[in-house]
Image (tube, rainbow, N blue to C red):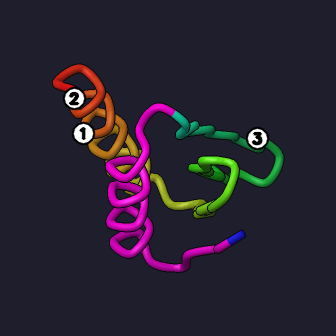
């Protein structure tokens, strides 16, 4: 399991992992209301990438990343 502290590093690694094997990748988001924490996880059962944040601006970045991943799924 790899925990990223930088959004840019997480997004690049997630796109690389997804492009390597899009059929086996899963993208999970969890929100903990009591802590105000958002946890993102992308895995292909071999490699697991995680990013945790409590910043509101990262939600917009999450929307952009998920739309990029969905767009790549549809075009393939």
What secondary structure is the stretch in magenta mostly built from?
helix
Residue linked to disc 3 = 33
Give coordinates of residue 68: x percent, y percent: 24, 39
User: Which residue: 37% across, 52% down?
Assistant: 20
For disc 2, the neighbor class at 10 Å (few under 14, some 14 to 19, many from 20) is few
Q: Are marks 2 and 1 in contact (CB under 8 Å)?
A: yes
In the image as oriented, which residue stretches furthest toward the left? 75
Split into 4 quadrants, where in the image is the N terminus?
bottom right
Horizontal arrangement in the rendering, residue 9 relative to residue 27 (left or right): left
Residue linked to disc 2 = 71
Pick whichever of labels 1 and 3 is earlier in the sequence. Answer: 3
Give coordinates of residue 28: x percent, y percent: 62, 38
Pick whichever of labels 2 and 3 is earlier in the sequence. Answer: 3
Residue linked to disc 1 = 68
**Which span of residues is magenta-colored?**
2-23
Q: What is the distance, in whole Å, between disc 1 and disc 3 at their CAs?
A: 26 Å
């Amino acid at each position: 399991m790899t925990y990223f502290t930088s959004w840019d590093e997480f997004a690049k690694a997630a796109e690389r992992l997804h492009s390597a094997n899009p059929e086996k990748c899963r993208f999970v988001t969890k929100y903990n209301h009591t802590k105000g924490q958002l946890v993102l996880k992308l895995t292909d059962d071999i490699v697991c990438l995680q990013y945790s944040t409590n910043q509101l601006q990262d939600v917009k970045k999450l929307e952009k990343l998920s739309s990029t991943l969905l767009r790549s799924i549809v075009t393939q």
